[in-house]
Image (cartoon, rainbow, N blue to C red):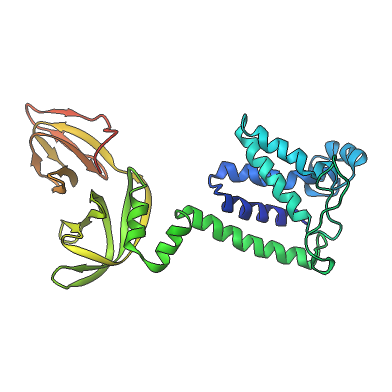
Amino acid sequence: MIAPTHIAYSVVFGTILGVGTSHELIYLIIGSILPDIDHPRAFMGRLFFFISIPLHKKYSHRKEIHGYPLWGIITALGYFYTPLLYIGIGGISHIYLDCHNVSGVAALRPFSDKIFVNFKYDWRVLSGSSKDILLFILFAGLAFTGLYVNKIGGVSAAIGDLIESYDIAYERYIKQEQKICYIEGQLRFVDGKTVFGTWLIVGKEGDKDIAIWNSENEKIIHIPKEALFLKAKLNISDKQWETSLIDGAVLFKKDAFYFKDSKWKHIKKDGVMTGKMNIIAQKIDIERQSGSKIDFDLIESLIR
C-alpha cells in the first residue's frame, strides 16, 4: 500500500482504540509508515536511504521489518516510554493492511517464513493501483469521521447530537468539570410555551437537574422545575469558569453566579453582595468595598 493509505488506515485504527490526542496520533502515523523503511523506494526508505539500503540488502521487503514480533516488542516497550506504544500500534496496523497486498507478508518472521494474506487473490490490492487509491479515499473519509466523533465525545455524543437527547447531553456535561458549556435545543416551559435557542449552563442542581442562563431576560431557568428540554445537544467551549471566594461587601462589575439552598442564583452586574460565598463567572470583575476582604485564589472543589 502507498504511504497515504497506511496513514489514513492507522488513524481509523487509532480512533477505534480511543487514541485521541494530537501527539498520540502523530506517533501512530509515524509507526504506520515506519515498516517501509526496509524498501529504498518507499517514502520512509527514500527519506532514510542510509538506513533503508542496508536493511533491504539484509532482510528484503516485507520480511523481518514487517514482522508482528518486532512491532509487538516495540508496543510492549511503550510501558516504559509511551511514544513507543503508539509507534508500535501504528506498525501493527501497517502489517495487517499489507496482508491485503497481492504478495502478502511474512508476518511472523523471524520465527516462520509463512506468507500471510487476507482474502482471495482477486480481492487483494497491488500497491499504487487504483484499488489502493480507492482504499485511501475510503480510509480518509472514515478517519475524518472518527476524529470528529472522538472530538465531540465519542459515539454516544454523536448519537446524542443526532437524536438530540437531553439525557445524553446531560451525561456529557457532568464530565466537563470546569469547562463552560452551552445547551442548544427546544425548551418547553410549564405554561406550555415552547422556544428554540442556545443557553449557557450555569451548573448542576441535582440528578438530571441543571440551571441555565437566559440572557434575554437575565434570569436563571431551573431544569426541569420550570421547563423541560424536548430536544437538546451540548456545545462545549474551550473556556473555563473563573471562580473565587469573596468575604465582605463586593461590587460586581460583571454578571456572576453562586450556589445556595440547592439552587444556582444570579448576581447582577453593578450589584453589591455581602457575606462569604463561592462565586463563578465567565470573567470575574469585582471591586472590594470598604471594610471587606477578598480571596482571589481559585477554588478547586467548587460545587457545580
Quadrant that contains the N terminus: bottom right
Q: Residue at x 19, y 39 (%)?
A: 279
Q: List x then y, in percent, for residue 137.
A: 67, 64
User: 153 and 219: which one is in front?
Assistant: 153
Q: List x then y, in percent, for residue 179.
A: 34, 46
Q: Quadrant of residue 189?
A: bottom left
Q: Quadrant of residue 225?
A: bottom left
Q: Residue at x 62, y 44 (%)?
A: 26
How many marks on residues? 0
- Against 32, residue 2 (above or below) is below
Q: List x then y, in percent, for residue 218.
A: 16, 56
Q: List x then y, in percent, for residue 276.
A: 12, 33
- Against 267, residue 155 (above or below) is below
- Against 198, residue 264 (above or below) is above
User: 289 and 191: which one is in front?
Assistant: 191
| Residue 109 seen in the current view | yes
| Residue 254 seen in the current view | no
In screen coordinates, is 19 left or right of 47?
left
User: 115 and 209: which one is in front?
Assistant: 115
In screen coordinates, is 194 left or right of 118?
left
Quadrant that contains the C terminus: top left
In screen coordinates, is 179 left or right of 215?
right
In screen coordinates, is 204 left or right of 276?
right
Q: Residue at x 78, y 54 (%)?
A: 98
Q: Residue at x 80, y 39 (%)?
A: 48
